[in-house]
Image (spheres, rainbow, N blue to C red):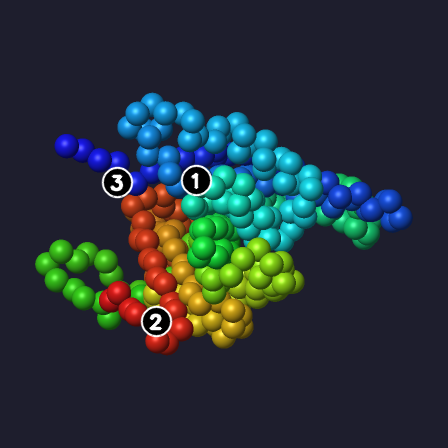
Amino acid sequence: MSQLAAARYGKDNVRVYKVHRDKETGVQTVVEMTVCVLLEGDIETSYTRADNSVVVATDTMKNTVYVMAKENPVTPPELFAAIVSNHFVETYKHIHAAHVKVITHRWTRMTIDGQPHPHSFLRDGAETRTVEAVAREGQGISIRSGIAGLLVLKSTGSQFHSFIRNEYTTLPEVYDRILSTEVDAGWAWKIFDGLDGVRSAASKFDAAWNAARTITLKTFAQDSSASVQNTMYKMCDQILAAVPEVQAVDYSLPNKHYFEIDLSWHKGLKNTGKDAEVYAPQSNPNGLIECTVTRQGKTSKL
């Protein structure tokens, strides 16, 4: 005999754009998001008995997102995600958990002739702000905020040596190298009792995002990196210190390699070691380094 062990379903890639028009100043502010909604609950029979009476149609979820965006603020995205997830748990008694992910895309106001333009924007990179909110019946709302797609590079100030060497090792020890990665970072907030708790903390979400981004960039640039592992731990430690309401910070950093090119075959041209100026960017394979750092007292899985 078989049984359904776990199930969730929903609507993904719901694209939402909202504009706020200040009638007094004429300044417009825009937000563009991609939203995913996944529901859990007493839905087993929809899988095992073809019983659609327990199904909230995914088209209904899409429409709900649009209505919630019209009737509520969409910034900070943590609050909007909490509003949407809480709505599904409160509206449908057989739904016991609602997962809502919001990806906010960059639209940066243009500066024209030295002045911010009132209604024109540019997409200045692939970096996004991410939020995952989960409302669980009787258990409150959990929120993880994050940064994704932030591509960074520094041309020196990184090294990697003194690692384990054996018969499988060909990597040379390096005392000065290019370091580049695409930042995927997140920070988990303490569980909120309910939507009112999220509303009361709304002013802290933007400040935490700005602090986490600043810490990430400043540490990346200024740290004399012995390894990606050590640099990312320093980032986590500083974010925990800067935002007391956060209980865990995680990073996933792919190591984007740039390899020296030996050009000695061409008239003895020197382009390795201290003479290296021309490099070959690599796509794959690549290193991938991840960690989660919590406050002391949390159980470690190491």
Q: Using the image, tell me which numbered label, if any, was put on residue 138.
A: none
Residue 244 higher or lower than 191, as above or below: below
Based on the displayed image, in which of its 4 quarters is residue 45 positioned? top left
Name the residue beneath numbered marker 1: 94
- First in residue order: circle 1 vs circle 2: 1
| Residue 103 seen in this snapshot | no
Residue at 37% from the left image edge and 52% from the top image edge? 254
Mark 1, residues whose alpha carbon is within 10 Å: few (<14), some, or many (≥20)?
Answer: some
Q: Is residue 93 left or right of residue 19?
A: left
The residue at the far top in this view is 50
Residue type at tag 1: His
**Which residue corresponds to mark 3?**
5
Q: Is residue 192 left or right of residue 180?
A: right
The answer to whether marks 2 and 3 mark residues whose Cβ atoms lie closer than 8 Å is no
Say if mark 1 contacts mark 2, CB within 8 Å: no
Q: Amino acid at mark 3?
A: Ala
What residue appears at the point 44 percent right and 72 percent down from the top-left corner?
237
